[in-house]
Amino acid sequence: MTADEKNRYKGRMPTTIKLGAEQYEDLSTENLTSSVDWRTKGAVNKVQNQGSCGSCWAFSSTAAMEGAHFIKTGHLLKLSESNLVDCDPKSDGCDGGLEIYAFQYLKKHAQELESAYPYRAQTRRCNWTKSKGEVKDIKYVQNKPKSVEALKASIQAGPTCVAVDCGTPWMHYKGGILNSKKCGTNLDHAVTAIGYGNGYFIVRNSWGTSWGEKGYIRMADIGGSGVCGVLLDSSRPSSTD
């Protein structure tokens, strides 16, 4: 993937202000399991490809919403990313957005299914229909930054939105555990942490299955800002309707 292609494949807005999540969640880290993989529990849909549209924020937040709904109901739905791309008024469609902006939108507008609102790698006029809305975000939380344990606790509770710097080490990732000091902390790409193991996080990307480990990446769970800034800004819908 060229640098120009990469620029079209990210799309997370810079976070320069406190975004005002309802709370910073302080989950207990005393009872962390040794590993979590929400794929094996049925809470994660197949990896998708956002195409030449900066809609990573919509894929990240949608995967987290799908996971939260599954945990509550036992049913995995395929929700619509384009519903967010076209309709979230605070984000800017294919030109970028934020996961928390998506959660704020979904507090008032239940997200439609992808079958009703199919994905298109472009920003179109909003076509949301109230009667077709399936899942609404009741509450979302942000996690304590720069804490491996806090992020693991959030992932243990459900798939969690994380932001990363998708510079050269990320862009050219082929497999294994990424632990590169060449990654920066310019959080320009939103993805979803769906598990962790011994020394790493499991993260779902939205660049198709030909990237990484069939669309996933394992990232070393080092402290500080984390690899590629993964510990700096994470959030999760903690309750859905």
Image (spheres, helix red, strand yellow):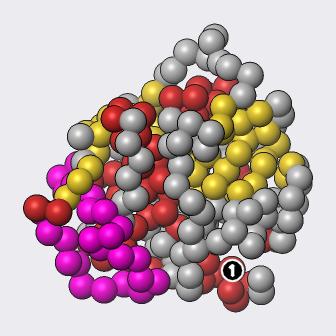
Q: Residue 83, how many percent across, how many down?
A: 31, 69
Of 234 and 131, the residue lying toward us: 131
Q: Is residue 34 visible?
A: yes
Residue drawn at x 65%, y 18% is 32
Q: Residue 107, how many percent across, how many down?
A: 23, 49
Q: Residue 170, how many percent across, how many down?
A: 78, 64
State whether residue 187 is above or below residue 197. below
Of 209 and 150, the residue lying toward us: 209
Q: Secondary structure at mark 1?
A: helix
Q: Residue 134, how many percent across, how many down?
A: 23, 54
Which quarter shows the N terminus?
Answer: bottom right
Magenta span contains residue 214: no
Q: Where, by quadrant of the figure, is residue 132 drawn? A: bottom left
Q: Is residue 62 left or right of residue 154?
A: left
Q: Is residue 89 left or right of residue 68?
A: left
State whether residue 156 is above or below residue 20. above
Q: Where, by quadrant of the figure, is residue 238 drawn? A: top left
Residue drawn at x 70%, y 63% is 215
Residue drawn at x 86%, y 49% is 177
Name the outermost residue toward the top.
30
- Number of numbered markers: 1
Magenta span contains residue 119: yes
Please tell me whether the stretch drawn in magenta is mainly helix, strand or loop. Answer: loop
Residues drawn in magenta: 107-130
